[in-house]
Image: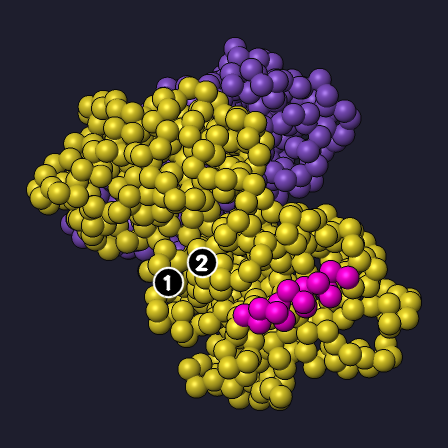
Chain colours: A yellow, B purple
């Protein structure tokens, strides 16, 4: 496992993507082929089933170290990762075991049929024969996620550089169905298991935030106006009876939306669509939070499929029967899109509605009301515009609604996990309710690393109790919280629920006396 | 009367009428070591190890009144026998041993049991009452042997050299920076930030020989450090000083770097768990060996560590102090306004 441990060490001693790519290439040049396949499998989340219960791992480690359980928990909440906590508390190894990554993987898979006693013996032996980094890797291989600060994109870029293969073909090949012990590295890299032409996506055309007065755009009839939706931008490809859905992050998300894939498969012809994947129920677009529940799951339950149904609001047609349409004006592409979909009228593939308006001033009102249908504003597209590659100013604008904001005080803080485990990053905020405080929202993002360190220091100094992961802190730090919507809710103590709360900024200029009052906040509900 | 009490000015010896590492101005302050959270300005008189004196003069003021002692030398103040014993934390760091009518209290300040090759190694002092830190009082913090850790630093520097990178270490200017200099000695030219250079003088004045180093002027171009070794204090992380260094690969040297999350969080390339505080095993080993009847935990993982001590049969309590938990923060104030 030495090569692999070296790779992990190298990946962890840099935060520069290029250096990570170099480290991966260096590994690929040195490691045996069967290890390389496992490396790709692990880094793309294709890991074998967990064969050892994590509670046993904890139990065995406590047996060895004779530490009390509560102290293990305190350590765990400081580290934020079970495999790492285990490797840190265990005594140094007294033996040296040297096996390749694929040998380790086979041993670990082999545990499946073994008794608990045999498993324990294997794990304890391994712990005692591996140094700190190898032990950490071993714990990760035993189960749990193998996240090591390398995105799929970085991995693909490294493999592209190593093999001269096209990145979309590699993405397709890696995302496809394959098992580490049934495929060779060469087959995987040369994409022999797939037909890469079928899946090749186009670069997305991106919009800029509107930065002019509407009147400066010209006359209203030169523009196609649609609602802007907060879902997942997707490119849906159907070629030669194969269907692929690419996200804007160039990830293949085909399998996350089986109902879309099935319907598209049934449609006639070959085409490439651009649209927004949304959770839609009874004709109403649901909050992004709902859609999020369905993302990145290993299995999608029937319940989930029926509770959070998916629709695609398509707004562009990039290719039809092998012809690239991107240079044609959007007005023409739109007409062809309408024809394609009207003929088929698939139930969950909709066409994005075009908003009728006569004067620019009417548009403002339409935008203001877009929140009511869970839209986040408007898209303005020049009718003569081609489908650009990437971001180009002038033809496509996004015009979002302004978020609502309140001032609230920090009352609970919790440490993050992974990269953020050393600092308090998850916050709960409260507003005034008569002479008391009531929690109003939880928010994770929005502060800079520096600010988070500063808040963490405050939390350390002002924590009211000091055990466990959550700290109650002195109500003193005031933050401006933005959110997209607000509604009444029985499940929240305050009686209101905020949609997408996030921290806009730390209001160091404000004191806790100046935070908002719940009764005032309720008036925001329409 | 108790030999020591914990007051809002600091640790106090009522019989001796002096304070140990006070955070408010007092008449007589006994100082464990030269870090800014333990050695503060405004005392009428300071008493410390004679290695600490040049540090206090550089950090506080040239004209402070300061009496010094050797390790083991006994001074009697109002009947209290006071002596200093090596704490192994940084040069001049001392555990303060107080004895009155046969009762012994030891205030250890910050300490480590590992021998870093620069500080006088930690000396065990048996006592009735022991005051301990607990900065790294969790079982996840166990340091590598000094040679193994130094090897890691050396390998990193060599790898950077191969890739034409400049190795930039971030470590606090008193203690850590000098350890880094020692660890990478001979691998290339060493450049240190002004604030480190100033404290290097405090080492040299008491006869400690450090590797050769240069002090580049970061207000000018620093292109000439390309491919070599640079050491800067933590306050300069993310600053323009680091951005000016050509082809920099950065590494933070701090005990917190033991945990991957902490390493990945900071905007540095690498992190090396190099600490001047005792690790988990070191704390327990030292505390058990003192055979103290009561252990007061002053700063760090206080609640958790004290609870564990009580569980393993060592009577312990937590006392509130203003000593920093954070290795990196202690010297900020001295760096923010460096002299030109």
Question: Is A341 within the magenta?
Answer: yes
Q: Vertically, is A112 above or below A357?
A: above
Main SS of the magenta part reads helix
Q: Residue at x 40, y 73 (%)?
A: A306
Would residue B314 be found to the left or right of residue A274 on screen?
A: left
Residue A315 or A115: which is nearer the viewer?
A315
Q: Quadrant of residue B230?
A: top right
Report the label total.
2
Q: Quick check: A399 left or right of A93?
A: right
Q: Is residue B8 visible?
A: no
When asked about the image quadrant of residue B165, the answer is top right
Res A225 seen here: yes
- In which chain is the residue bearing label 2? A
Which residue is painted at 45% across and 72% down in the image? A308
Q: Position of residue B238 (x, y in %)?
A: 63, 40
Mark seen at residue A256? 2
- Answer left or right for A513 relative to A465: right
Residue position marked by numbered label 1 in the rendering = A300
Q: Which residues are magenta?
A: A332-346
Rounded to the nearest angstrom, the CA distance separating label 1 from label 2 is 8 Å
Give yes or no for residue A243 being in the magenta stretch.
Answer: no
Percent x, y for residue A488? Answer: 51, 86
- Residue B177 vs B25, above or below: the answer is above
Say if mark 1 contacts mark 2, CB within 8 Å.
yes
């Amino acid at each position: 496992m030495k090569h692999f441990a070296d790779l992990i060490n190298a990946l962890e001693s840099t935060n520069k993507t290029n250096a990570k790519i170099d480290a991966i290439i260096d590994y690929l040049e040195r490691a045996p082929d069967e290890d390389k396949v496992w490396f790709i499998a692990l880094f793309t989340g294709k890991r074998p089933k967990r064969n050892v219960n994590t509670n046993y791992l904890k139990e065995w480690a406590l047996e060895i170290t004779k530490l009390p359980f509560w102290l293990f928990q305190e350590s765990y909440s400081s580290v934020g990762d079970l495999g790492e906590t285990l490797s840190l508390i265990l005594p140094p190894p007294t033996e040296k075991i040297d096996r390749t990554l694929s040998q380790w993987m086979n041993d670990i898979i082999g545990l499946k049929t073994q008794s608990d006693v045999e498993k324990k013996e294997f794990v304890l032996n391994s712990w005692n024969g591996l140094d700190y980094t190898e032990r950490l890797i071993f714990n990760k291989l035993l189960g749990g996620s193998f996240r090591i600060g390398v995105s799929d994109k970085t991995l693909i870029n490294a493999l592209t550089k190593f093999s001269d293969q096209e990145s979309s073909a590699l993405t397709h090949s890696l995302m496809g169905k394959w098992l580490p012990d049934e495929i060779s590295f060469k087959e995987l890299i040369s994409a022999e298991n797939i037909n890469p032409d079928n899946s090749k996506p186009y670069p997305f055309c991106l919009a800029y935030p509107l930065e002019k007065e509407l009147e400066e755009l010209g006359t209203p009839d030169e523009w196609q106006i649609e609602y802007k939706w907060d879902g997942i931008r997707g490119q849906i490809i159907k070629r030669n009876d194969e269907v692929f859905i690419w996200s804007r992050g160039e990830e293949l998300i085909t399998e996350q939306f089986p109902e879309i894939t099935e319907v598209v498969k049934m449609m006639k012809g070959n085409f490439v669509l651009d649209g927004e994947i949304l959770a839609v129920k009874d004709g109403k677009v649901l909050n992004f939070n709902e859609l999020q529940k369905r993302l990145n799951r290993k299995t999608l339950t029937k319940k989930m499929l029926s509770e959070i149904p998916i629709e695609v609001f398509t707004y562009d047609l990039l290719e039809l029967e092998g012809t690239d349409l991107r240079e044609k004006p959007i007005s023409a592409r739109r007409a062809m899109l309408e024809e394609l979909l009207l003929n088929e009228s698939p139930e969950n593939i909709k066409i994005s509605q075009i908003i009728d308006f006569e004067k620019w001033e009417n548009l403002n009102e339409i935008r203001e009301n877009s929140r009511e249908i869970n839209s986040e504003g408007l898209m303005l597209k020049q009718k003569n515009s081609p489908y650009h590659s990437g971001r180009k100013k002038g033809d496509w604008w996004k015009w979002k609604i302004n978020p609502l904001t309140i001032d609230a005080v920090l009352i609970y803080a919790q440490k993050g996990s992974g990269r953020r485990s050393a600092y308090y990053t998850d916050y709960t905020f409260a507003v005034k309710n008569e002479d008391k405080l009531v929690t109003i929202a939880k928010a994770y993002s929005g502060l800079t690393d520096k600010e988070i360190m500063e808040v963490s220091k405050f939390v350390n100094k002002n924590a009211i109790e000091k055990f466990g992961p959550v700290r109650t802190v002195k109500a003193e730090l005031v933050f401006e919280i933005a959110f997209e919507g607000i509604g009444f809710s029985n499940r929240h103590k305050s009686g209101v629920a905020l949609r997408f709360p996030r921290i806009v900024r730390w209001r160091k200029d404000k004191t806790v006396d100046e935070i908002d009052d719940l009764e005032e906040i309720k008036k925001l509900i329409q | 009367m108790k030999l020591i009490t914990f007051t809002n000015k600091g640790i106090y010896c009522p019989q001796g009428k002096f304070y140990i590492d006070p955070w408010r101005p007092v008449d007589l302050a006994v100082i464990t070591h030269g870090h800014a959270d333990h050695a503060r300005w405004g005392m009428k008189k300071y008493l410390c190890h004679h290695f600490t004196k040049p540090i206090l003069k550089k950090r506080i003021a040239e004209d402070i009144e300061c009496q010094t002692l050797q390790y083991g030398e006994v001074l009697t103040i109002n009947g209290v026998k006071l002596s200093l014993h090596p704490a192994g934390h940084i040069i001049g760091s001392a555990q303060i041993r107080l004895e009155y009518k046969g009762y012994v209290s030891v205030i250890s300040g910050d300490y480590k049991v590992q021998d870093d090759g620069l500080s006088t190694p930690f000396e065990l002092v048996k006592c009735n009452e022991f005051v301990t830190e607990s900065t790294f009082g969790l079982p996840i913090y166990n340091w590598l042997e000094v040679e193994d850790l130094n090897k890691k630093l050396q390998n990193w520097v060599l790898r950077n050299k191969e890739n034409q990178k400049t190795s930039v270490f971030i470590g606090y200017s008193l203690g850590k920076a000098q350890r880094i200099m020692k660890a990478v000695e001979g691998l290339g030219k060493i450049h240190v930030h002004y604030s480190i250079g100033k404290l290097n003088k405090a080492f040299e004045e008491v006869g400690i020989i450090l590797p050769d180093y240069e002090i580049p002027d970061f207000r000018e171009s620093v292109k000439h450090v390309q491919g070599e070794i640079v050491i800067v204090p933590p306050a300069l992380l993310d600053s323009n000083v680091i951005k000016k260094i050509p082809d920099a690969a950065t590494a933070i040297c701090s005990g917190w770097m033991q945990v991957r999350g902490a390493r990945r969080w900071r905007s540095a390339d690498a992190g090396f768990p190099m600490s001047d505080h005792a690790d988990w095993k070191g704390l327990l080993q030292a505390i058990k060996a003192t055979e103290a009847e009561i252990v007061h935990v002053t700063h760090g993982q206080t609640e958790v560590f004290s609870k564990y001590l009580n569980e393993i049969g060592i009577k312990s309590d937590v006392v509130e102090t203003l000593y920093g938990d954070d290795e990196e923060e202690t010297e900020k104030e001295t760096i923010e306004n460096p002299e030109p």
